[in-house]
């Protein structure tokens, strides 16, 4: 399985970020074609001290090809546009293959 991962740093004002994420961005993510799983983690801390992260998202796809097709789709472009509007300076995105 290929996973697309988005790691969001804690925004200066979490409440408006959370509202946008939950009401607009998350519904767009759920519409990605070929998405097999979507896990959203609200970061609540770190083993030592405070975490600088707020949310982690993992979107699972059957393969890299399926993920690439989803991102190139109309729905994928809508997700990317929205991401750039509300969290461009807060997010790090990467992908990888599950090992187990």
Image: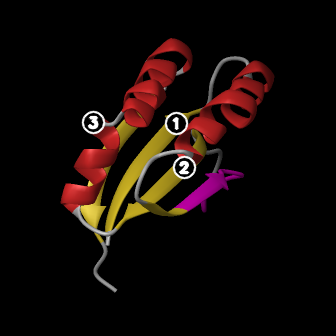
Position of the N terminus, as image quadrant, is bottom left
* Residue 27 percent location from the top left of the image: 65, 39
Q: Where does label 1 land, which residue?
A: 8
Q: What segment is highlighted magenta in the picture? A: 38-47
Please name whichever residue, 60 or 33, is drawn nearer the observer in this view of the structure.
33
Residue lying at 34% horizontally and 86% vertically, measured from the top left: 100
Q: Nearer the viewer, mark 2 or mark 3?
A: 3
Q: Looking at the image, is mark 1 or mark 3 earlier in the sequence?
A: 1
Q: Where does label 2 land, which residue?
A: 56
Q: Which mark is residue 91?
A: none
Measured in 3D between alpha carbons, the distance from the residue under mark 1 to the one under mark 3, in whole angstroms, is 22 Å
The answer to whether the residue labelled 2 contacts the one labelled 1, judged by CB atoms less than 8 Å apart, is yes
Residue 51 can be seen, yes or no: yes
Q: Where does label 3 land, which residue?
A: 72
* Residue 61 percent location from the top left of the image: 36, 63
Q: Residues within 10 Å of mark 2 (few under 14, many from 20)?
A: some
Horizontal arrangement in the rendering, residue 52 relative to residue 76 (left or right): right
| Residue 51 lies in quadrant | top right
């Amino acid at each position: 399985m290929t996973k697309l991962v988005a790691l969001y740093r804690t925004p200066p004002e979490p409440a408006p970020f959370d509202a946008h994420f939950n009401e607009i961005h998350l519904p767009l993510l759920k519409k990605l074609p070929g998405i097999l799983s979507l896990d959203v983690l609200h970061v609540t801390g770190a083993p030592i001290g405070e975490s600088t992260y707020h949310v982690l998202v993992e979107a699972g796809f059957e393969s890299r090809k399926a993920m690439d097709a989803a991102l190139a789709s109309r729905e994928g472009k809508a997700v990317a546009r929205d991401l750039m509007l509300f969290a461009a300076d807060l997010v790090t995105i990467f992908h990888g293959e599950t090992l187990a």
